[in-house]
Structures are given as C-alpha cells and as structure tokens.
Amino acid sequence: MVRKLVVAAVGLSVAIGGMVVPAQVAGAVGAEVSPVVLAPDDDAAAPVDGASADGSSDATAVEPEVVDPDVTAVPVDGVDPAASRDSSAYAPAQTDAASAPAVAAVDPDDVVALGARTFTGHFLVAGVTWDPGQDVAVTQVAVRVREGGTWTPWQDLDVVDVGVPGERPGTEPLISSGADAAQVRVATAGGDAEPAGLRLDVIDPGTTPVASTSTSTPTSSSGDTGVQAVADVVPAVETVPAPTPTPTPTTAPAPTPTPTPTTPTPTTPTTVTVAAKAGAKGDVIRPTIVTRKQWGANEKRGSAWPEVSSRLTAMYLHHTAGTNSYTKAQSAAIVRGIYAFHTGSRDWPDIGYQFLVDRFGTIYQGRRDAMTDLPIGAQAGGYNTDTIGVSAMGNFQTGNPPAAMVASVEKVFAWQAYAHGLNATGRATLITGSSTGSNTKAKAGAKVSVPVILGHRDTNGTACPGWRLYEKLPAIRKAVKKQVTAAIAKYGKPVPALPAPTAVAPTSTQVPVQWASKSTYRWKAVKGAVSYQVLTRSSGLTYAMDDDRAWTVLKTVKGTSTSIATDPGRTRVIAVRAIDSKARRGLVTVIGQVTRLVDWSSVTRSASWKRSTATGYTTYRTTASGATLTVKSVKQARAVLLQVARGPATGRIEVKAGSKRLGYIETRSSTTTSRAVVRLDLPASTSGTITLRTVAGRGPVTVAGVAFPRVRTAALTLGLGLLPSATPTKVALSASQAPFLEATSSVYRWKKVSTAVRYEVFVRTAAHGKALPSSWTKVRTTTGTSYRLPTSPSGRTWLVGVRAVGKGGSSAITSFPRATRPVSSALVKRSSGWTTKHGDSWYRAQVWQATTAKRTLTVTSAKSVRAVRLIVASAPGRGRVVVKIGSTTIKTVSTASAQPTAHRHIDIVLPKARSGTLKVTTLDHRTVRISAIVLGR
C-alpha cells in the first residue's frame, strides 16, 4: 500500500510546534506529545509484536505471514522558509570517515531542498529518491527523524546506483527503531537546480511473527562484545536448520556449486594438508538463516534478478544507516521495509543484498535464490558481478558492532568461502563496471586488486560499513579462514551438488549460425536432477559480447530440451545446469554459441542489387562489379558467413573492415546450387564497418544472408545444402477449388524444391459456424508434389499448407487459399412460398423455387464470411434477390440470364469479413430457383 503525503498544498497541512502535520491528524499531535502512529485506516497501530523494553523477544514458533508494507511518499520541494530559520537546519550530518567517526558539513548555498519537519506516521525504514534522467550532481542527502519524541542528528545517506534500467536514483535506506516524523536536506554541486521528483519515502513494514527456537548465543572470534547502550545480547533466531553433510563417493572435488566450466582459482589459495576423503556439498556448513517466507516477504513485489554470477571472487561487508537500538522483534520488519524501499521506491527487481544480519546475530536471506545461487546484488555499484554482499543492520560509526552480529557475519562468509574455494585472507581481482552514480574509485574497465573479504569503502567513495565495523575486518578474515580450514579438515573440499549435463551436439543449422529464428537445444538427463536451468550470455550485432563473469537465466525446465528464440544479428551462448530437490545448482555445460543472420534492414546496398523472393526467401543479386553490401558498427566478428548461389560462372566477393582488406570469398563452383554456405575466418576479432564488394570480371553474385559469428572454425566452406529448404511454391488453385469448392475432393500441387527430401502437408479446418483453429494439423508426409484432400462434409472450410523438409531442416509453411463447401441443405431455413423441385440437371439434383416477392432463405451462425456464392438455375425473365448478413445489405443480384442455365454461379465479394445470420430474399413476383448457398471465408 502506498500513501502520498502532501505537505505543500494549502489546507492540507498545519504547523504545530515547528513541525508540519497533515490537517486530518493535527488535532491529535502536539509539539511535546509522544509519537503518534498513523495506521492506514487512521486508527492507532498496535505495538510491535513480541517487543519488550530491553529489546528482547518472547516470540514462539508460529506460521509466518506475508505482510505488505505501508509506504508513505513525502514530496520535498525547495527550501522551506520556516525550516531554514532553525538553528540546526544546516548542522553537519553524521557520516563515516576513513579513520574515525566524523561529520559532513554543508554549505547553505549548496542546499537546494530543505523540507519541513514533517509528521509521517509510524515507520522503521526511510530513504530519499528523485526522478531518473537528470544531470544533477547530488553531493549530500541528509535525513533526521523523530524517535520517542526526540529528534536525531542529521544522518548522511550514501547515494547508491546499481545501473538497473528504469531505476529511480536515490540513497541507501535509513533504519529506525520507530520514528513518526522526518526532515530531508539535499545539496548539489554549486547549489544547482533541485532534482525533479524529489521525495522521502517512509515505510511502516507492519508486523508478522517469525518462527523461532532458542539457541546459544553466537560467539565472535574477532573480539568485541558490543556497546551503544545495548542490553544483554539476545540469541539469534534460528529457523532454518543447517544442512546435514551428505558425502558422495568421489575424490575429485570441485571448488563451487555454481561454476562455469573454467572456474578460476583464487589468487592466493589456502594451503591445507588433509587426508583424501569423500567430499560434502558446499552447503554443509551453511549457518541458520531466516528465509524470505519466514520474514514475511511479499513475493508479488519485484521479481527474481535475471543475472547470476558464474563464480564468486570476493565478498563485501555492507551496512545500513540509522539506529542501532531496534528490538529483536523489529528486525524482520526492518528487512521487509528495506525490501519495500528497494523494490517500490528505487524500482529494483529485488532487495539489494544477498544476506542481512541484525545486531542480535540473526541472519536473513535477502535476494531470491541467494541460498542456492549467486544472484547479482547491489552491494557495491560497479563491482556487483562475481561478488556478494552481507549487510549489517545498523550504523557503526561510533558504537562497536555486537559480538553476535560479527559472529554471524563470519559464518556467512565462511560458508560461502568454503563452497566457492576462496582464500579468506587472500586477494582477488575485480573489474570495474560502468555504474555512473556509485562513486567508484577506479575508472570503468579498470582491474583492481582487493581483499577477498572487503568493505564497501575499499572500492567506492564511501566509508561503509562504518569505521567500527570496518576495523574488525582483519579479525573477521582470520576467523573465516579458520572456519574454512576446519571444514576442509572435517569434510574435505566440497563437491558439486550435481554433475554437468552432457550436451547433445547442435546441428550444422544451429552452430555457428542459427538459421531459424527459434531452435531447440538438448542435453542428457542428470541423475538426481528435478529440473534444469537454461542460461545464456548474448549481445546484439553492434554491442560487445558479455564476459564470462555472469549468466542471464532464461528459464527453468523439467525436461532435457528447450526452444530458444534469437533476434536477427544476435550472438548467444547457450548453457544448462541441473537443479536437485534442495534447489542446489550443479555444474554448467555450454551447449554452444550461436549467431543469427543480420536483418536486411541493417545492410546498406548499392544501387545495382536487385531483390527477389522467387525462391521462397529473400535474395539480392547483382551482375555489376564493385557492388557493395555494407554493415556498420559490427562488434567482435571472428568470421564472415554468407548464404550464396554457387555455380561455374558465379562471382567473387572482397571483404573489407574499414579500408583494410580481410580477404575474399569465392562463390564459383563446378556444381550449381541456389543456396550454399561459404565462410571467411578472420585473423582476429574485428569491429567496425564491414563491406562486401563484388570483384570485376568474375560473374554475377547472389546473396541470401549475411552473418558475423564470434567464433572461428577450421573450414572455409561449411558445405552445401545444409540450410533449411526453400519454401515450396504452390501451384495456383483453379476457380472450382477456391474460395468455393463444390466437389467432394480437391488436389493441391506445388513445385519441387531441389534440397527437399520430403514434404509435410498440414490442414486447418472448421465446420460451418466455427472459427478456424490457430494451429496446423499434419495430415500427410509425401515425397511427391501433390496431395488430394477429401472434402465431402457440407459447409466446412479448409486451409491447406505444405512445407519442404531437407537435410538442413524444414522450410516455412506455404498456405493455399481457403476453400469452403456449400452449406448443408438442412441448415437452410425457408419461409413460406418456397417449394422444392428435383431434377438431375440441377446441383444436388434439386432447387428451391419461389414465384413471389419477400420469400426468404435463412442461414444462421455465419462466421467470418468474405464471399457468398449462390448456385442458381437461371433463365430469361427470372427474378432478383437481395443478400443480407445481419442488418447489413450486401448486394442485390438478378438470377436472370440470356440463355437457360441449370447450374450458374452468382459470386459476391464482401469488403470485409462479416458474421451473423445470412438472408436471401426475393424482390419480384418472378421465378427464382436456388440450389445451394456457399459462405466463403
């Protein structure tokens, strides 16, 4: 639920004790009164379940509930005059510094927005955002809140940008132990214009019980017992039992449950000497974690992050901003609030962190799938790929983080380091991404050497995770290494949850070029798998290929095959991994790398090229020398592949990148074929404008397709006749076959396709009054070039199609015109005045005869009629009829003719398809004889 709190409109707010309060609640609030909670129904909200004065909880095991937080949006517009007169309006904001706690001063001239002290109603999480697409350098966002009737100092909030398309720029979340009012201050470089759409979002996450059991208090091996007026440390909630070791009979350990086929080893590997033993799965030392379901996540918010890291290289320690005095019972609600801020206010698909740890040592699952995979997070802009983030819930610039929290952070890092083969005290290399708003210390693309376990401040312009927590990192690294060493000694190095699937080799029509827009890829079943995750990396024609640090999850399937559509010009790596019954991922198998033909709209052609579709597919042909086909902005091509016509007199093509000649492609061959595949491998990855130019004096050139694979192959020529067959060319139907069909069978014919080994015939058919189905039904496979269709049922419509099947695959379906049989006599209702006469010369050996006006033949349930045929017996002096569908008059026609004709067609074409009741009505006191009515579609 989202509430918008308007504080600037006249009549909607009043000032009480220097604080802006919505008018509807002004009577209940005074300057010195206790905090007032504004629930969505304007009633006072109940106290947080299970909370006590000392921060402890007496929660018992209960069924968790999904809770949708209440978000209140507070617009911030310019500098409030009354607020600016407050002596503390421009006071320095509390922030983190590199070596000690500090404050961030602000120049009043740089402040572009200063909101009033605004009553918001109860909230636990807050954050500031503004509209995207603005070139505004925000230098400080500070917020202060009222907790327990007392205003906090200004708190400086880091601006965080994760590069998600469509995200709202904004800050990290601020957490509270229970506030009811807030004030915002925003400064920009030089006091430039205020960001448009600036607002403060405050979030009341609601309350839901989280199942809990008593456990012993975690003990940190890095020292401190915690300060900041925290009472006795409350044991962590433990609701997800740690997994039991399940050794497997192998002595060939793998470093990670989610690797690529070539997972690198850490820069400084841990040296441990242990006896060979059966390995356990990577989650054998996973600590107890509160799942998303248990902390009440509404999974309708956001979605799974589509990208996952292919390996884990480093682990970030993060923190939130705000209070450290929240109760244990409030922790799950705070996680829900952060989730709501990230997905609703920032428009991210999911919460930013993989894991969160509260001050009592409770570990919470953040991202979807973070327990079993490596979903890319938002822990450090520019470095989110191949890393994870653990966020400590609190602000540790002055007070020491509690021992329980530090111990749980160590457990998460130890579990991940063990599972992924990381050296906790070693170093790793990260590649800087292009995250424009994350204040990275290095330029985009730069490689940086960092500790395997590091703080957010190590790579970005922030002091997160707070000085007091950051100074514990050396001890945390040592503790993590000690736990990993103990795990290896006890269980051995971890083995994969499941082996890599065995790929079924793609065909020559899939790799290196996928000729069809959609193709099916297969693999063999893996014992123990309940499903398979299909992964991809891809890039368009003009973009660099994604590197190997991440995968995009395409889909999850139950079977051992998947159909994948790929856009023209795109290159795609296709991979698969198995998933077991515990949702653990196995090793990855790469099935292949495919590239699609470039769309002709991306190819610039010189004037002499002539387009043709006579072969059933688009070709361009030229007899001129120097004719060019040009494709601009090609990225990373390793080959040029063409579909061409070949023969004893065909020409030669020069290939150039910019002004540099790369080589020639020869289309001349002793044998003639209309569609062959030829290829020129390039000496290196090539980007830029690629031009194909016909060589003088070498003969005509016909090109049916152009592709730029990003992988090499040994052969210059891949072979002939391996492409999907051309679409068959249909032989036109006669006037007696379509759109009206009176015979009880009909023969369909097509021209032979040279590369076809057989043909498949399909039909779509429907009875009178029924719609044609959207899908085809195969009725015949034949090596011939004709098919006889039985058409005895009256009133039925048929649509026939045929496709060619060759060694390189199937063509598209060629469809013939629709054909419809006359409506059954039983369905033609006759008004009074009609009589039935019989004779062999008439169609169906009968006619209906009327001799006076206003006599009607009626056919109900006509469907999508595009043409009407009346089969009549005509003669001089015969009468006229009017044809209507529904209330629309279609046409008036005469049944008279110069000579008597027992079987005459009167055809009427409609301007558009019509459905409804058809009526044929006589207009004269003259004879009308009708044998049948046909409703063509």
Image (cartoon, rainbow, N blue to C red):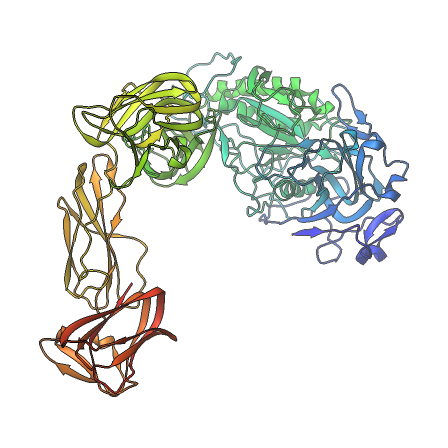
Q: Is residue 50 above or below residue 445?
A: below
- Report whether 70 appears left or right of 23: left
The single residue placed furthest to the front in the displayed view is 898
- Report whether 853 appears left or right of 298: left
Question: 407 and 716: which one is in front?
Answer: 716
Residue 565: percent from left, percent from top:
38, 39
Q: Is residue 581 above or below residue 658?
A: below
- Report whether 441 appears left or right of 621: right
Rendered image quadrant of residue 407: top right
Residue 572: percent from left, percent from top:
40, 31
Question: 120 and 398: which one is in front?
Answer: 120
* Residue 222 in view in this figure: no
> Which image quarter holds the C terminus?
bottom left
Rendered image quadrant of residue 628: top left
Q: Is residue 393 above or below residue 687?
A: below
Question: 158 and 523: which one is in front?
Answer: 158
The single residue placed furthest to the left in the displayed view is 840
Number of dots carrying numbers: 0
* Residue 475 in view in this figure: yes
Residue 399: percent from left, percent from top:
77, 27
Q: Identify the residue at image location x=36%, y=32%.
A: 607
Residue 932: percent from left, percent from top:
20, 74
